[in-house]
Image: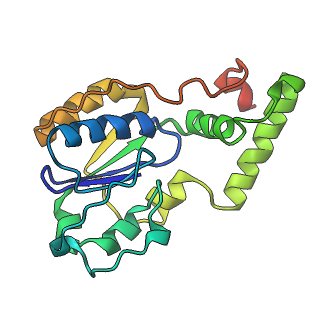
Amino acid sequence: MVIISHKYKFIFFRPRKVAGTSIEKSIEDFLLLNNDMSFVISKFGYNIYLPENILTNNKIDNNKLYIHVPPKYIKKLILNEKFDNYCKIIIIRNPYDMVISWFWWIFRNYNFNILSKIQIINKFQKFVIECEKNNKTNFNKYFYNNDTKYDFILKYENLENDIKKLNKLLNINIINNYNLKNNISKKNIKIKDFYN
C-alpha cells in the first residue's frame, strides 16, 4: 500500500506483515478528515486522485497498482522533484516476527489443528526456504533492490512512540486506533520455537 499526501508532503510505503493495515487505516482517516486523499492505493478502496502536475506522464498502468507497490514504481509514476522532496516513510518489523506473521497469513485457511507443533514448524521452515528461493521478501522489494532513502522509519515494536515522532516531524495528528489482523495465528507457538 502506498499513500502520497501532497498537502502534507509525504509518501508512506507499506511492506507485508508489519502492522501496515492498521497504520494505513489510521493515515487514511487523518487524510480524509483533512480533505487530502491525493493518492491512495489501499485495501479499503482504490481512492486515486492524481493531479496532472505530479505525473511523469498522464498514463497510469493499473496493472502495476497493487497494495504493496515498491518505491521504484512510485518514483517512476510521479515527478522526481516530488518524490525526492517528500518525506518517505516506511514501517518495519523484527524480521523473525514478520516472517512468522506472514506464514500465518498465507496459511490462514489451513487446518493446523491436525498438525503437531513439530509439523507446523517444519511447514514454516519449508515456507521460509520457498520465500527466499523466489525472492518474496520485503527486503528485496523495499531495501536491497531499491535506491530509495527513507526519511522516517516506523518500527512495529515502538509504534506508539514512533507515530508521535512522525506527527511532530510532519505537523500532523495521526492516531492509531486500530489493531487489525491481530488474531491470525492458529497455534500458540513461541517465536524462538520456529527458529532452531
**Looking at the figure, which quarter contains the C terminus?**
top right
Identity of the residue drawn at 81% across and 39% down? 123
User: Image check: 152 left or right of 126?
Assistant: left
* Vertical relation: 24 (above or below) 62: above
Q: Nearer the viewer, residue 173 or 148?
A: 173
Residue 151 percent location from the top left of the image:
25, 51
Horizontally, is 93 left or right of 187 in the view? left
Residue 41 relative to residue 184: left or right: left
Give me the residue at 16% from left, 62% from top: 85
Image quarter for residue 24?
A: top left
At x 14%, y 49%, the residue is 8
- Find residue 63 and report its horizontal and vertical position in percent: 50, 70
| Percent position of residue 126, x then y | 80, 46
Percent position of residue 189, x then y: 71, 21
Tally the marks. 0
- The image quadrant that residue 107 belongs to is top right
Relative to 43, say whether 121 is above or below: above
128 to 80, vertically: above or below:
above
Q: Is residue 7 left or right of residue 142?
A: left
Query: Which residue occupies 44% across, 25% down?
Result: 179
Q: Is residue 91 above or below residue 1?
A: above
